[in-house]
Image: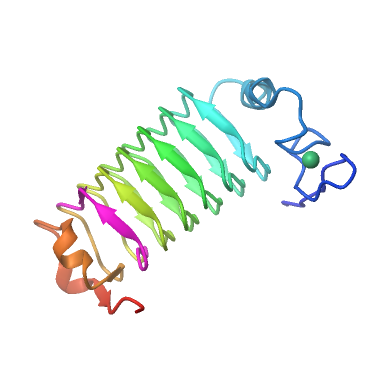
Amino acid sequence: MFVPRGCKERGCGRPALSGSDKCVVHHGDVAAHVQRLIAGTGGRIVLRDLDLTGIRLTDTNFTDAELTGCRFTAATFVGVTFRDAQIHLSFLDRATFEHCDFTGATLQNAVCAGSEFLDCTFCDCEVVQTNFLGIHGVGTSFDHSNLYGSRFVGSVLERVSMRDCNLTRAYFDLPHRESVDFRSSNTNEAVYVEPLP
Ligand SMILES: [Zn+2]
C-alpha cells in the first residue's frame, strides 16, 4: 500500500523518497539511492508502491521490469529502456521522457498526464486505459500497439505515429486526425472530441 510521507527537512513539504526520510531535493545522493533500490530487487527489477517523485534516471535498463503502484511524478528519464516492462497503476505524470524505449511494454491504468515524450518508442505495446491527457509528444511512435481506452485529449502531438493500432475507445482531440499518422488503424472505433477553446 502506497503511503506518502513528508520530507524530514524542516519546512519542506515535498514527499520523502521511498527508503529515505528526505525528498529528492534534500537527499544527498538520489542517483545512488535509486540504484540501491533497483539493485535490491535482484534479477528482474520489481518496484512496487514506491514514491520516487522527481528522480532523474539516465541510461537505465528496466527491460522486463515490473513497476506497480509507483509514483514517478515530475521525474526525468533520459535514454531509459522499458522494453517488455509491465507498468501498472503507476504515476508517470508531469515527467520528461527523452529517447526512452518502451517497445513491447504493457502500460495499464497508468497516468502519464502532462508529461513530455521526446523521441520515444511505444511500438508493439499494450497501452490499455492509460491517461496521456495534456501530454506533449514529439517524434514518438505508438505503431502496432493496442491503445484500447487510452486518452490523449488536450495533448500536443507532433511527428507522432499510431499506425496499425487498435484505437477502440481511445480518445483524441479532433485536430489529432490531421496531426497524427493513423494509417491502418481503426479510427472509426476512436472518439475525437472538440478541443477546449
Ligand atoms: Zn525536502
Ligand 1 picture quarter: top right
Q: Residue furthest right?
A: 10
Examine the rendering and report whether any part of residue 186 can be seen: no
Residue 27 x/y as whole percent: 76, 30
Q: Is residue 182 above or below residue 6?
A: below
Q: Is residue 111 above or below residue 20?
A: below
Does residue 135 appear left or right of residue 94 in this picture? left
Q: Residue at x 56, y 51 (%)?
A: 91
Q: Residue at x 40, y 27 (%)?
A: 79
Residue 130 x/y as whole percent: 42, 59
Q: Is residue 16 above or below residue 136?
A: above
Q: Which residues are magenta?
A: 150-163
- By what rule are the colours in the image chosen? rainbow
Q: Is residue 165 above or below residue 48?
A: below
Q: Quadrant of the C terminus?
A: bottom left
Examine the rendering and report whether any part of residue 104 can be seen: yes
Q: Main secondary structure of the magenta part?
A: loop
Does residue 22 appear left or right of residue 138 in this picture? right
Q: How many marks?
A: 0
Instruction: Give residue 101's quadrant in the image.
Output: top left
Residue 20 x/y as whole percent: 80, 33
Q: Residue at x 82, y 48 (%)?
A: 6
Instruction: Look at the image and say whether residue 160 sits in the magenta stretch.
Output: yes
Does residue 181 appear left or right of residue 192 in this picture? left
Does residue 145 appear left or right of residue 70 in this picture? left
Q: Which sits in the foreground, 129 or 25?
A: 25
Instruction: Look at the image and say whether residue 14 sits in the magenta stretch.
Output: no
Q: Residue furthest left?
A: 184
Q: Residue at x 44, y 61 (%)?
A: 131
Residue 146 x/y as whole percent: 28, 55
